[in-house]
Image (tube, rainbow, N blue to C red):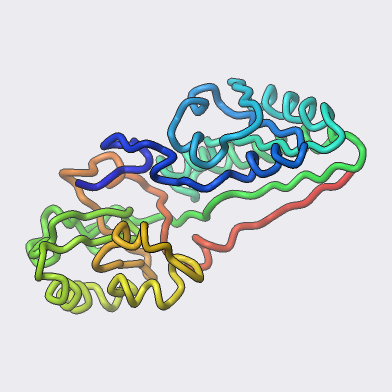
Amino acid sequence: ELMNQLRWKPWTEPKAWQPYPTVFQLADAVGVHTAQVSAPMFEQTPLTKIALSGGSFLGRLSGEDRMDVAAQRLAAGDRSLVYTYYSEVDGKGHRFGTDSDAWRGQLMYVDGLARRLAEQLPPRSALYITADHGMIDIPFDEQSRIDFDEDWELSAGVALLGGEGRARHVYAVPGAQADVLAVWREVLGEQFWIASRDEAIAAGWFGPTVDERVYGRIGDVVAAAHDDVIITASVNEPHESAMAGVHGSLTPVEQLVPLLEVRS
């Protein structure tokens, strides 16, 4: 059974999944005042616990309130680290695509939020604005959306399909790893980078080193798209398969994210 990190199912103890201290815990340990300002619904999620533990969590519904509270918390200590998050640029991109009025409207709104926070920075502060990924729009046609659940070639010998449409982790039944790798390369090799687990690790897809304890989480086969295409799973992932905008692969549009700096 695969663990879904967004839904956190099946349940796994967060500290067992990610045992290392967070940036906020490290900052707390040396006397830095820390806080996270985000939507209230994120406060108790396992992802928040493994990535943002430490300091105080301040839930606010509106983007404007988040910016105001973030500025207040930044000014609350001699040394402060404050994180604030707004999710709807990502949400509208997934639902409508980045070439949509809905997405552009959210981008304009976030531009205003960033300006609001920048104008409230206390002296000797730095504001960094970024995102965790880019996004690419995928047409709704059979050539661009390859349905794993309807493809007998790709599903042969596969026990579990993980990852997301642009970066699939394929877990083979015992003894079928080599055959699955060969078939995926033959069928998808012109549109995807296809690698075995060890090849992907050696190529640095998962960073300079991979801990032994997480080695088995990586698929026996990893498929990362370089063309405008995704692998959907219409039966098992109906919501994700219907997304207009997606991400997860190694292309520049998905990986190269601006980092904006404002200093007071």
In this rendering, the answer to whether 187 lies above or below 78 is: below
Q: Is residue 174 left or right of residue 166?
A: left
Q: How many marks?
A: 0
Quarter holding the C terminus is top right
Image position of 237 with respect to 217: above or below: above
Report which quarter residue 249 is drawn in: bottom left
Looking at the picture, tell me which residue is in the foreground, 74 or 235.
74
* Residue 87 drawn above or below residue 134: above
- Taking depth in this image into account, of 137 and 65 the one nearest to the observer is 65
> Which residue shows up at 64% across the image and 29% down it?
37
Q: Is residue 147 visible?
A: yes
User: Height in image: 208 above or below 1?
Assistant: below
Instruction: Tell me if I can see residue 109 in this picture.
Output: no
Indicate the position of residue 167 as horizontal and vertical percent values. Answer: 35, 61
**Residue in view at x 31 percent, y 55 percent:** 165
Q: Residue 250 falls in which quadrant of the image?
A: bottom left
Q: Is residue 186 left or right of residue 74?
A: left
The structure residue drawn at horizontal position 58% and vertical position 63%, both measured from the top left corner, is 256
Q: Nearer the viewer, residue 26 or 97?
A: 26
Q: Residue 10 placed where, x, y %?
A: 26, 37
Residue 200 horizontal/vertical position (percent): 37, 73
Direction front: furthest residue: 29
Which residue corresponds to the image point at 70% horizontal and 42% vertical from the top-left? 27
Residue 139 on image: x %, y %: 34, 56
Does residue 235 appear left or right of residue 239 in this picture? left
User: For this view, does 258 lie left or right of residue 247?
Assistant: right
